[in-house]
Structures are given as C-alpha cells and as structure tokens.
Image: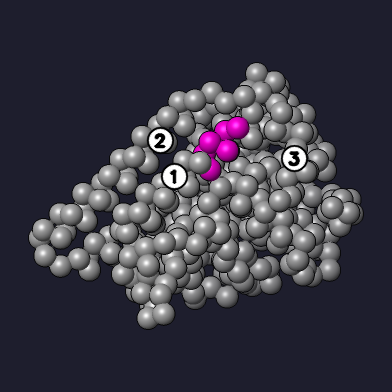
C-alpha cells in the first residue's frame, strides 16, 4: 500500500496540526459559513474564457479520479440497492421481516458512526483505522442478514441508469471526453454494476474500481460483498495504482482526485491537486489533522489568476487542497472550468519532473 509518501502525516496529533488561517490571502482554515462568491467567480471565468487553476505544460491534467456517491451523484445510492431488493420481497410478513433486518443494520451503523464522529483521535491513521473498522463491521452485518441476496447484474445496471447525477456533472464528463482526459472512478459503493449503469453513456469514464456483490452460477447475488474498496487506505492503494499504470498524453502529468467523504482523505492528500466537494465535516477534519507546512486548503471560488498567480504557483509547486464548496451545480461548474477551461495554467512545469520521479 502506497502510504510512504504521507507517512509523516500519521504521527501528527490534532494539537500539532498547523493552522491554515495565517497562510495566504487565498487560503483559509476549515471554518464553515464563509460567504459564497460563485456569481463573482462565474463573471471572472467568462471574462477570461475559462479559468485554469490546474494543469501542466499542455494545460490539462494527466489523471483525473473521482469518488461516486455524493460526489457525482445526488445523495448516497446504497439505499437504492436495498430498496430494489425490498421491492422483490413478496408477502406482508416477509416484507416486515426484511424491513426489520434492514433497520437493525442501519441502526447499528448509525450508532457506530456517531461514536466515531464524537471521538478525538491522536492521529489521522487512528481516525481512518477506526473508520475502516466501522465500515467492515457494517458489511459483516449486511452479509449475515442477507439483505442483498437475490439481485441480478442487469437489475443493478438498470437501477444505475436511473441514478440522478449532480448538476453540471454531465458537463464535466463531456468536457473530459472533448479534451481527451480519462476519468477514473474509485468508490466504496457495494455494486460496481450500479456505478456502471449510472455512467454507461460517458465515454470519458475509463475504469471503475469498487467493491461488488458476489453472484452464484445462476447470476443471482449471494448477499456477500467482494470488499475491494472499503476504507481510505483502499482508495489510496487504488489511486496510487492508477498513477503508476495509467498512460498519459505527453505533457500531462498532474494527478487530480475529487471526493466528498472521509474515505477520500488519503487520495486527496496524496494527489497533486486534491479537491474536496460537499463540505463534509469528517473529511475536512481529517485534512485538518493531516495538515503540515506544505499542505494548505484553499477555496476554489477565490482563485484570481491575475492577482494570485505568483502565490498559487508557489502553492501548487508543493501540495494544495481545494474546497469546491457544498456540492451541486455550482461546485461542478467551478471544477469543470478549473480543469478544462481555456484560461491560464498555474501549475508549474517543474511538477512534471516531480511526478515522474515518484
């Protein structure tokens, strides 16, 4: 598992985390409730025919990796899988039994999550270890209750085709195709078929790495889950694999990761450009714990190419994490323009040599 690059982060306690407030005019700490400036941001983009905050010598990233649930989608989609399974249960008594089993799984998970969120951890590693245990314990309950037994791949693909994506996600994926930038999905969802169905029509999506239901010889789900991606450590391993093995067009080397939840913490930190979307308190808390001198959190909406070029060039030569806001159309509008617009690239060319040497 490729954790060596960020191993120095794991020993830092929350008390040792460096404050982000005093860094630069364009970078802030993790305080919420900051006034939004999306209208100004859009006007700034239109004047420049597209703001390019990221890129390489070619002006485009070499690798773009995104989370699925709550990042690309409107809400978490796992509940849609259990709803699909419940719809196949016949008989009032049987339905009540199914709902009781599902309620027990959900209640136990929420209890564990509340305990997790109320705990002060000595390090990022301890926080993510505890989160991983919470997720695995939940999957243990799902499997023992067999609440996902009896589904087919075709049903899950069809379900995925009806999943609603966030506003401007389609624009993002189509812009990636137009610019010949491959998009890769790494998700802790339990059904790869559901993700496949949701993204089937987008040619820019090249790979999907996720857990998946297991199926018997008749193609019926057994209720078990093949646990490929469960934790932030799993996501980091998958992201690092893509960085090592994904061919890139000459001049495109920067690796971008976009995510919304605690499992996305490590790949966001590891990426050349990490983007937080959705304003997840648990994710922002993890980044705060991990923050060291060369990590800063900047609001994507506040980038001004003319005024901040020298400062941003300095930041991007190290590591920078961008907060794209609370999710939805505004966030994806900003991300699309930042990655695929026609404006000025701020990422130093020296980054190419840095990435190649990793």
Residue depicted at x 70% and y 26%: 12
Discs 1, 2 touching: Cβ within 8 Å: yes
Magenta span of residues: 126-132
Q: Nearer the viewer, residue 43 or 29?
A: 29
Residue 148 is tagged as none
Where 101 falls versus 32 (above or below)? below
Which quadrant holds residue 223? bottom left
Residue depicted at x 52% and y 58%: 227
- Structural crowding at the residue carrying mark 1, measured as other residues with C-alpha within 10 Å and reported as few (<14), some (14–19) or many (≥20): some
Q: Nearer the viewer, residue 158 or 309?
A: 158
* Residue 150 percent coordinates (x, y): 31, 69
Mark 3 or mark 2, whichever is nearer to me: 2
Q: Main secondary structure of the magenta part?
A: helix
**Sequence order check, earlier mark of 1 and 2:** 2
Q: Secondary structure at mark 2?
A: helix
For residue 141, say whether it is visible: yes
Residue depicted at x 11% and y 65%: 91
For residue 28, say whether it is visible: no
**Looking at this rendering, what residue extends furthest in the top direction?**
15
Which quadrant holds residue 84? bottom left
Q: Which residue is mark 3?
A: 6
Q: Secondary structure at mark 3?
A: helix
Q: Could you tell whether 314 is left or right of 343 in the image? A: right
Q: Could you tell whether 266 is left or right of 145 in the image? A: right
Q: Which residue is mark 2?
A: 112
Discs 3, 2 touching: Cβ within 8 Å: no
* Residue 142 percent coordinates (x, y): 36, 53
């Amino acid at each position: 598992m490729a954790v060596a690059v960020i191993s120095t982060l794991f020993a830092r306690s929350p008390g040792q985390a460096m404050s982000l407030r005093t860094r630069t005019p364009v970078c802030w700490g993790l305080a919420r409730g900051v006034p939004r400036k999306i209208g100004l941001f859009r006007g700034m983009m239109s004047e420049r025919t597209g703001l390019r905050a990221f890129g390489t010598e070619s002006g485009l990233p070499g690798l773009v990796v995104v989370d699925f649930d709550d990042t690309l989608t409107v809400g978490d989609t796992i509940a849609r899988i259990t709803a699909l399974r419940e719809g196949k249960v016949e008989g009032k008594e049987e339905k009540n039994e199914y709902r009781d089993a599902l309620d027990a799984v959900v209640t136990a998970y929420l209890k564990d999550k509340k305990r997790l969120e109320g705990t002060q951890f000595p390090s990022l590693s301890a926080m993510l270890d505890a989160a991983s245990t919470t997720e695995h314990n939940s999957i243990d309950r799902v499997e023992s209750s067999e609440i996902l037994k009896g589904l087919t791949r075709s049903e899950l693909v069809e379900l995925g085709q009806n999943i609603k994506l966030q506003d401007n996600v389609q624009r993002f994926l189509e812009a990636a195709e137009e610019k010949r930038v491959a998009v890769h999905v790494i998700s802790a969802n339990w059904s790869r078929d559901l993700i496949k169905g949701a993204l089937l029509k987008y040619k820019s999506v090249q790979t999907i790495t996720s857990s998946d239901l297991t199926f018997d010889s008749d193609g019926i789900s057994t209720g078990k889950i093949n646990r490929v991606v469960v934790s932030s450590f799993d996501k980091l391993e998958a992201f690092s694999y893509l960085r090592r093995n994904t061919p890139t067009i000459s001049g495109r080397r920067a690796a971008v990761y976009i995510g919304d939840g605690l499992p996305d913490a490590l790949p966001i930190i590891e990426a050349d450009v990490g983007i937080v979307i959705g304003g997840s308190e648990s994710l922002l808390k993890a980044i705060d714990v991990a923050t060291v001198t060369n990590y800063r959190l900047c609001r994507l909406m506040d980038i001004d190419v003319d005024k901040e070029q020298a400062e941003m060039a300095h930041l991007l030569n190290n590591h920078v994490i961008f907060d794209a806001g609370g999710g939805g159309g505004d966030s994806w509008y900003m991300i699309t323009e930042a990655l695929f617009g026609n404006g000025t690239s701020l990422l130093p060319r020296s980054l190419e040599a840095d990435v190649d040497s990793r």
